Image (cartoon, rainbow, N blue to C red):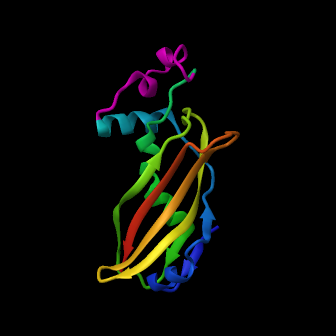
Amino acid sequence: MTTTLDNPKALLDLVGHELGRTDWREITQEQVNRFADATGDHQWIHTDPDRAVAGPFGTTIAHGYLTLSLTPIVLAEVLAINHLGMAVNYGVNKVRFPAPVPVGAELRATVTLTAAVEKPAGIEAVFTLTYEIRGGTRPVCVAEVVVVYR
């Protein structure tokens, strides 16, 4: 589901609304390894499938920050804004990783517009992203991300 708006100001009328949910996407070992290369985080729970079998999760798991780094693609999948000059990632107010993301799991996110205010720089929007894995009982990531739209 994609919410389509004519311009960034239309966000002001959607505060408190769920904007959509992404499709399921598989998290692969290759993706985890590339993220490890990009960040220098090669901890065995992420990158060593043989060792991870005997570890606390029974398999390799995605980095929490890998999950969070999917934010731009998640927002693009659930929100389209016509007549948009630009969107700038402004930051993260809060982020938690309540459960692991096993490699091979399918992940999706639900996006809710938590706040939106007009500021000199543009419309500052706060989104709550709740990531889940198929068959999971708890969210794997809950984050409040801030984007400024012009």
Q: Residues in magenta?
A: 40-57
- Residue positioned 50% across, 82% down in the render: 12
Q: In this view, does 112 lie above or below 30?
A: below
Left or right: 41 as drawn, with respect to 15: left
Q: Is residue 41 above or below residue 59?
A: below
- Residue positioned 60% across, 37% down in the render: 105
Q: Quadrant of the N terminus?
A: bottom right
Picture quarter containing residue 48? top left
Residue 48 inside the magenta-drawn segment: yes
Residue 123 inside the magenta-drawn segment: no
Q: How many marks?
A: 0
Give the image location of residue 68, x and y in percent: 44, 49
Give the image location of residue 35, x and y in percent: 38, 39
- Residue positioned 55% across, 83% down in the render: 13
Give the image location of residue 85, x and y in percent: 35, 81
Q: Quadrant of the C terminus?
A: bottom left
Of residues 120 and 58, the one nearer the viewer is: 120
Of residues 118 and 149, the one nearer the viewer is: 118
Give the image location of residue 143, x and y in percent: 48, 53
Left or right: 122 as drawn, with respect to 132: left
Q: In this view, does 134 lie above or below 57?
A: below
Which residue appears farthest toward the right when viewing the image? 135
Q: Is residue 78 above or below residue 133?
A: below
- Residue positioned 48% across, 35% down in the render: 62
